Amino acid sequence: MIGLASIGICALLLALLYKYVLEPAIFSPLARIPSPNFLSTISPIWINRKRQASKETRTIFALHQKYGPVIRLAPNEISVNSLEGLRTIYYGGFDKHHWYSDIFVNYRTRSMFTMLDRSAHTIQKRFVSNLYSKSYLHNSPDLHSIAHDLVLDKFLPNLDSTARNGHPIDMFDLTQAVGMDFTTAYLFGSANGTNFVDNVEFRRHWFALYQVLYTQTPEERAYGEIEQWGMSMCKAAEHMMQSEKPVESTQAVVYSRLFTGLQSTCADPQQVRSTAASEALDHLFAGHETTGITLTYLMYEMSQDPALQSKLREELLTLSPPLRYPSGDRLPAPKDIDALTLLDAMLLETLRLYPAGAGPQPRVTPEVPGRIEIGGYSNIPGGVRVSSNAYSIHRIAEVFPEPEVWSPERWLTTDEKKLEQMRRCFFAFGAGGRMCVGSHFAIQGRVTRLLRSELLDLMVISRTVMKLVATAIYSNFTTSIAEDSNMEPMDSFVGRPVGNKLVLRFERVLV
């Protein structure tokens, strides 16, 4: 009996050894892919520790530098850093990993950003995607009214006062405020949106709450202060939509279309509202933060180069009318701002070097006959977590020479072959059929053509603000750095500055 028991125990141990050690480390189809150490071939502990220590993205970049475009991070996880990989994973339509729904759910309800089912995503995307198309934005009277009031009546007077008083100002704080005001007005109508530019006390309270949000699970933050705040704007927009009384406001452009579309597919009023609110909250989260991050790093680089500021100003003053304050009372046409090549190059280069969404965007390999080939590695089974990240893709030296240097000139090259290669590797808004629906709104211009007008999940919703705000600033002021400590981007899904601020001095330009 003892002998049989011993044999049984040995057999069990051997089976466990095969299943948890030998199979993943030696016999798995992923075993041929380079990995940083033996532990990562048999357990996700190693990469999970990197994530918990906020070292994931930089670690993955260093591994790609050492081992090549395909690396194995865990028994069932790989990272890919190549154009071929982008085509296979993102343009190939791989489904999202459950990581999104584990982290980003609002109101206990999935939005497009967290939907794993592509068919449901497609239906919901259809309600709003054209509202962020370039043609719609260029011709939207609501958007024009919002931009006019925000830039000419709030933002520029604020900067003018700062310049006259000689007081430095935290532009990461202010550009996030601009992004929030712009996004909420487009979502809910100007009468129902925020006034973060003027209400400094509340915006800083809200930004502090938002930092805590990063550390909470969806259940922990469900219907907390931020979600209640978001719901109040949704209800105000609904009230305006149903009211017969005239209201001094732009339309609730996005929310009304989303709410009406959801009503056509769902009979439960509460589910319609929670779904619309979850979607709207994603839009304004992404809109304010990406605007703030991108413009902050653009001004950070520009403030170190007075000559480049002058060169940009020459281009900006060719606009008709130029965006001069306080003499001007009209904004340039969006299509004219789009045509500014140097401004466009500066924004593209900022998004390349400092992508707001810098971290991995995980997908899952599909179950298909014959399995999948990625980067020369064949027979990859279904169910494998696979990702690329903008931080690493944008630092492929063969595509972007001297990748750590902020060089707008690279986007002004006349070498069409080189330019096309850079375009294909531009990953600031993701890629493929679930690319950011706000990508037109966020940049408003040539980058939308680089991205071939495909739509991915929400991450950015403030494109128009970026070019418009940059035009407003450098048409009227010079900037210089007063304080720029800890400007290194965080190693996380969102690459905001570690120091959480950029303090600049403004001086009026006399033309």
Image (cartoon, helix red, strand yellow):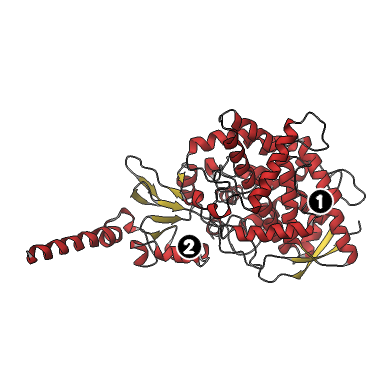
Residues 347 and 118: in front is 118
- Which residue, given by chain and number where applicable, does mark 2 sit on? 60
Residue 128, above or below 164: above
Residues 284 and 24: in front is 284
Residue appearing at x 53%, y 59% in the figure: 392
Mark 2 and mark 1: span between their CA atoms?
Answer: 39 Å
Could you tell me if residue 28 is visible in this image?
A: yes
Split into 4 quadrants, where in the image is the C terminus? bottom right
Residue 466, labelled with which disc? none
Residue 150, above or below 55: above
Query: Would you say 260 lies left or right of 368 here?
Result: right
Residue appearing at x 62%, y 56% in the figure: 356
Query: What amino acid is labelled 1 in the image?
Result: Leu
Query: Would you say 86 lies left or right of 326 here?
Result: left
Query: What amino acid is labelled 2 in the image?
Result: Ile
The secondary element bearing badge 2 is classed as helix
Split into 4 quadrants, where in the image is the N terminus? bottom left
Query: Would you say 301 lies left or right of 352 here?
Result: right
**The quadrant where residue 407 appears:** bottom right
Residue 316, labelled with which disc? 1
Q: Position of residue 348 (x, y in %)?
A: 66, 53
Q: Position of residue 145 (x, y in %)?
A: 81, 40
Foreground mark, 2 or 1?
2
Mark 2 burial class by Cα count in 10 Å: few <14, some 14-19, many 20+: many
Residues 350 and 77: in front is 77
Could you tell me if residue 437 is visible in this image?
A: no
Mark 1 burial class by Cα count in 10 Å: few <14, some 14-19, many 20+: many
The secondary element bearing badge 1 is classed as helix
**Of the image marks 2 and 1, the number of the one nearer the N terminus:** 2
Residue appearing at x 74%, y 43% in the figure: 185
Residues 42 and 455: in front is 42
